[in-house]
Amino acid sequence: MGCSQPLRMGKHCFLRFTTMKLRDRLILSIASVLVLMTIILVLDVETMLTSSRSLLNSKVSIQSSRGRHTFIQRHLQKTTNGSRENGSFGINNKFNSNGMNSLDDNTHDEKHQRKEVNRHKFVDYDQPPTGAPQPQPKASPSSSTTPSPPPDPFTDLLSIVVKVEKINRRAKQKHRHWNPNLGELLGLELSSDSSLWDRFHLQIARDWLHPPRDKDPTVDLLLQHTSVQPIVKITQKEGGTQLKLIIEFADGGHALFKPMRFTREQQTLKNHFYFTDYERHNAEIAAFHLDRLLGFRRAVPCVGRTLNMTRELYALATGDLLKTFFISPDNNLCFHGKCSYYCDTSHAICGNPDQLEGSFAVFLPGKEAAPRKVWRHPWRRSYHKRRKAQWQVDESYCDLVRDVHPYSDGRRLLDVVDMSVLDFLMGNMDRHHYETFKMFGNNSAPIHLDHGRGFGKPFHDELSILAPLYQCCVIRQTTLKKLLGFQQRSDSASQSLSGRMRQSLSQDPISPVLWEPHLLALDRRLALILQAVRLCVEKADDPGTVVLDDFH
Ligand SMILES: Nc1ncnc2c1ncn2[C@@H]1O[C@H](COP(=O)(O)OP(=O)(O)OP(=O)(O)O)[C@@H](O)[C@H]1O
Ligand SMILES: [Mn+2]
């Protein structure tokens, strides 16, 4: 019965009325709480996204460069897949799933690794010297268990390469390419009893430091020779930031020695800049193999060798260098030499107890016989902890470079792009200068030297190294063709870029030269380079302005 009649409006009815009001109020309050919570949630997610974005921007130092921005934007929009989870494509993945904002994919891995380091703290006999960064054991193999879709074959780029090749074939037939070597220019001929050193030096040509491997065995023989030749003299190399020795062999040959400091698993310290990063002897060796696989053949041949420090270094050291040798508390023979970075007792290079691994880069011909010219790299970084280089803030920086000799015509801009491809694959940010042989004139290939700071961050892809490529949007047709060849075979364990590198490096005396994650990074970065080229082609009116055949 209702309370509609005023007469019946007694106490009972009033109570029912109050009860109903209370229920309504309760429902109302719950509803408003729900609405409020929804608003808060929406606001929170939005704030998180905004701050993540700005953090992402600062962390990966996204420059105002439109090319790079577009490049990164594209990656952010890509749906992720297994093979990309370790790379910068992984930004998307992390960003979405965890609300995290780092380009560095090692966050997870390093956490995992740090745990591992602690766990193995008392069984790790391979500790670096005191005060040095701690080694990090292998990353979790979880990424390899993620099923990955077949790799993008980039057939669009392949058809452009074929077209460019066809168009230029006739022009190429008319054009006689001049590629003299030092022997020809110096009027010196090789004879059957010429040493391997002379063979290497006199065959250095305008286009490359060494001829193709299948055409001439000199480099392989010389590396093998360098790894066993008796050492008769050592001197510290003047200049440069970190310790290196000039080694003289019994047969009169020379090599530049860079010592091992840390184990293969050691990554660049998170708070170190590229210019304070320790040099890695194995990076020098790996860079030579990578450069050769890419078909550049512009890197100085380099091989690993384990020295007996007592007999092969200490016994030969003299003067100031000798004074830096000592026996560590752990009874290992150590020395530190003199240089501007890391040449003191707390950064000493120590044997185990006197066995020391190092890289041996065969010496180029003397400067008297074949003088070299040193060029400032147009995409040089600032080498200052707070400053940026112009190319990092100027979106049309390439236009400036294109106006300047020797980038305004000839091969050099394409060489700089080749260098950026090589450096991006190995994560080398330390390309401040490069050298050429004066004798070949300005239209000669640059020499790829100094790769000790490559292969430091296997879980991070430093896209800015590709700036010459995505800011100028040009690439040599032969380079692109080579890269596409590796990409087409990227799901083959032996024929992918990582597979070919693994195979090539297995021939070195200090194999395994690289920690496995560095090899896997190569395949991931290869796809990123091709993606950058694709974006350039999409932006261009004519793909023939991006993919260039300069007859090299
Ligand atoms: N194989 C070589 N043959 C002859 N000269 C070499 C060789 N390797 C390096 N050099 C010379 O030594 C210089 C220093 O070598 P490298 O760049 O590897 O050492 P670095 O300590 O990293 O130098 P920097 O700190 O100046 O970058 C090079 O610029 C080059 O001129
Ligand atoms: Mn250097």
Image: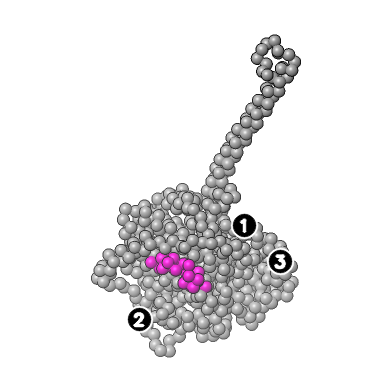
Q: Amino acid at mark 1?
A: His
Q: Alpha-carbon neighbours of circle 3 within 10 Å: few (<14), some, or many (≥20)?
A: few
| Dot placed on the residue nearer the N-terminal end, 3 or 1 | 1
Q: Amino acid at mark 2?
A: Gly
Instruction: Give the main secondary structure of the magenta stretch.
Output: helix
Q: Alpha-carbon neighbours of circle 2 within 10 Å: few (<14), some, or many (≥20)?
A: few
Instruction: Give the residue at mark 2.
Output: 187
Whether 257 is drawn above or below 404: the answer is: below
**Disc 3 Cβ-to-ligand 1 distance below 8 Å:** no
Left or right: where 444 falls relative to 97: left
Instruction: Give the residue at mark 3.
Output: 120
| Dot placed on the residue nearer the N-terminal end, 2 or 1 | 1
Q: Are marks 3 and 1 in contact (CB under 8 Å)?
A: no
Q: Nearer the viewer, residue 482 or 268?
A: 482
Instruction: Give the residue at mark 1.
Output: 108
CA–CA distance in space, label 3 to label 1 = 18 Å
State the colouring used for the structure image: one colour
Q: For mark 3, give the secondary structure.
A: loop
Q: Alpha-carbon neighbours of circle 1 within 10 Å: few (<14), some, or many (≥20)?
A: few
Q: For mark 1, give the secondary structure.
A: helix
Q: Which residues are magenta?
A: 481-502
Which quarter of the figure has residue 278?
Answer: bottom right
| In the image, residue 490 lies in the stretch drawn in magenta | yes
CA–CA distance in space, label 2 to label 1 = 59 Å
Left or right: where 350 falls relative to 156: right
Q: Are marks 3 and 2 in contact (CB under 8 Å)?
A: no
